[in-house]
Amino acid sequence: MTTATPHDDTRLWDFLPMLANRVRPAQDCLASPLLDLMRTSNVNKIPLEQIEDAQSVLRLRKELLAAPGDETDADGWQRVAQLQRRIVERHLNGRADYYGPEQCAPLDDAETFAREGRDTFLIIKFMDEAPHIEATLTSLLTQTGVDLNRVVIVAVDNNSTDGSGDIVRATAASVPSAARVVCINQTTPGGGSAARYGVDRSIATIHAMCLSDGQWGRLQSARIAVSDGDTVYHHQLVHGFSEILDKHQDVDGVMPFLTYKFTAALRFFADHRPHDLKVLRAGATAGTVVPVTFRLSDVSAFERLPRAGRRRTAEDAMRLSGDGIDLSVPLDRLDGCGRRYGVMEDPAGARAYVMDDRTIVLDRAPVSGFDSALLFLENGGVRADEKWRWHSVIGHDLFLLWMFQRMGIPEAVVAPDTSDALKVFRCWSFAIGGQHQLSSPALKIVTGTDYQSGRVQQAVGCRTVLGPATAYTETEIDRLAKMIRNFANRQGVFYGDTRSRGLERASGLYLHMTRIQDQVESEIRGYSEDFFRDVVFPERVLFPLRWLLQNAICLYAGGDRSVQTVVRERVFAQLLGARGTDEALAGTLADTAMAALAGLSFEDKRDEAESLAEELISGFYPEIMRFYARTLADFLDTQGVVRADYAWLLEDVEHSRNALIEKRAPIDPAVVWAGREFVIDHARGQVVGMQDGGR
């Protein structure tokens, strides 16, 4: 079993490639391909002065932080605050002129927020997310390790018609929390419009708070995060990004570590029967409720109640034992599928449902964590002909999570894109620009809205980092489902073309598909094992490999000797092996190639590094897949899964197909929604139905 040695990897952040943009001519930053979609979208354009002031903030702040006694340089920090105020006010004035003043008006109670010390604004944008929105909001209301008296949750309803707004209000009223919840409605359709509305009103609120008490340093310290309405959060995620921003004043953004919901991914398996939370709740008071003294509102409950300590007894009860815990929970109720279950409740009223197969369903965090996925495997739920299905939708994400958590890969290697999975920026840097509804001449709605604000920050040189993999985000599987279905239709599209470069790959047409989710998942359950083996897994695993290696190569090219040592020993040697690393450093990653890479612009550097990453994947695929198998084996061993229950999954993984051997023809991402198959509400960007025989 591997035990990761604690490291302080934050020094790697000093060599992230976007930092070079701080001294790039402002006009070149404004002309960057990172901002191309701004130029084709219905949005106020970022003025040159905004770029110049942002770069001035970054350079001056760096000098102050590097100087001895920097915290006492009141004049220097006052100058930073003045520049940040100018950026924020220019942004708000530009938005008001373009969209109207009501689109960026402060929220009510700004002065109260200032007195209460609230400085963390979490925006949830949603449209018709009735199946998911309660879990999203609950996971934020029950965060731990952070003072929730600092938090304001801004729920932005984008004209939902399925009762999502009522669910938000009911959840806010029923879940005890010190966080404040504010509900607003954005009538302009589009997820980007809803996010912009929430962000701009939060920026305006923080500005109003500064006006009320004169504390302009709040523009640096306050932070704003954005979430979709189908995503849930580890209970220490807000603590994780708050700790980074509080400690590292030269970090302006944090992107949480993101996976798909493991429990939701089980719906792709033939023998999985989801638990209906409404049914479990309805029977909660019909029998014995076992009180417990520990929290049941987050995944820490699984640590207190390990799977190995759950044992069905003859008298129809479940014995639960762990560190200082010995409970018997009567299985005295039946769910809608005839499965027996019992109920536990913690001191705060949060409940957990103990199922007869040892699964524990947490009422206030129903789809967070991998406990259910491991039990499904241990209970024989994965059929012999679902091995590659498991790797495609479960193993892939466990690999990604564990290689950072325990295999020594540093999160600090990554300069992340930022999606609406609670990406967080300082107030002043969010005001540089971005976060709006995107379009292009070919596409009315361009997915990538959530990335745009991060691209603005990268273009000017703001430091954006990846959050800790120990406090992760799980998002709904709709995008994964659509990608799998696209592959089945011989359409290599995620958002954009999966073989295009980074910006194009993350920019395409994506429509809200909650209403057809069940139909798509039902279809995918019928796909063959050969399809998952030969297409889905090879294409999916290419994403994290290319992403990690591209970032590592950029850092290696621009780093000093100590940084290069970290990248060589903890990334290249892990993935490629010792011999493969030596070969790579003599060939693809030779000094001359790295020197040439280091001299490129930020955008060209990432594209070239991605080409080099693909060379490594093509040349050392068996070695990389051995690391994949080793990582999963370490994860499953650490989690106490008996080797006999999983060894068959890892057999011959190193001989799996390398997707890069097939050169795909370019594809227009719009074609995946073309034809008569889908009934689309184009005004709302939503698929409302599917028609048989429409392909």
Image: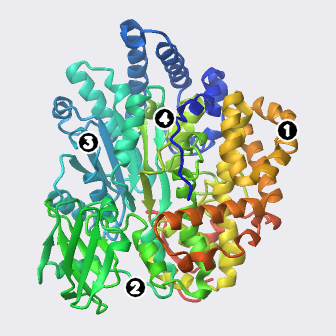
Q: Which residue is mark 4?
A: 433
Q: Image check: 360 left or right of 534?
A: left
Image quadrant for the N terminus?
bottom right
Q: Secondary structure at mark 2?
A: loop
Q: Which residue is mark 3?
A: 151
Q: Earlier in the sequence, mark 3 or mark 2?
A: 3
Q: Which residue is mark 2?
A: 273
The answer to whether residue 127 is seen in the rendering is yes
Q: Earlier in the sequence, mark 3 or mark 1?
A: 3
Q: Secondary structure at mark 3?
A: strand
Asked if marks 1 and 4 touch (Cβ < 8 Å), the reply is no
Q: Secondary structure at mark 4?
A: loop
Q: Marks 1 and 4, how far apart in space?
A: 38 Å
Q: Nearer the viewer, mark 2 or mark 4?
A: 2
Q: Image check: 182 left or right of 529?
A: left
Q: Earlier in the sequence, mark 1 or mark 4?
A: 4
Q: Residue at x 70, y 27 (%)?
A: 560
Q: Image check: 180 left or right of 568?
A: left
Q: Position of residue 507 (x, y in %)?
A: 61, 54
Q: Earlier in the sequence, mark 3 or mark 4?
A: 3
Say above or below: 244 vs 661: above
Q: Marks 2 and 4, how far apart in space?
A: 45 Å
Q: Marks 3 and 2, how far apart in space?
A: 37 Å
Label at residue 590: 1
Q: Nearer the viewer, mark 3 or mark 1?
A: 1
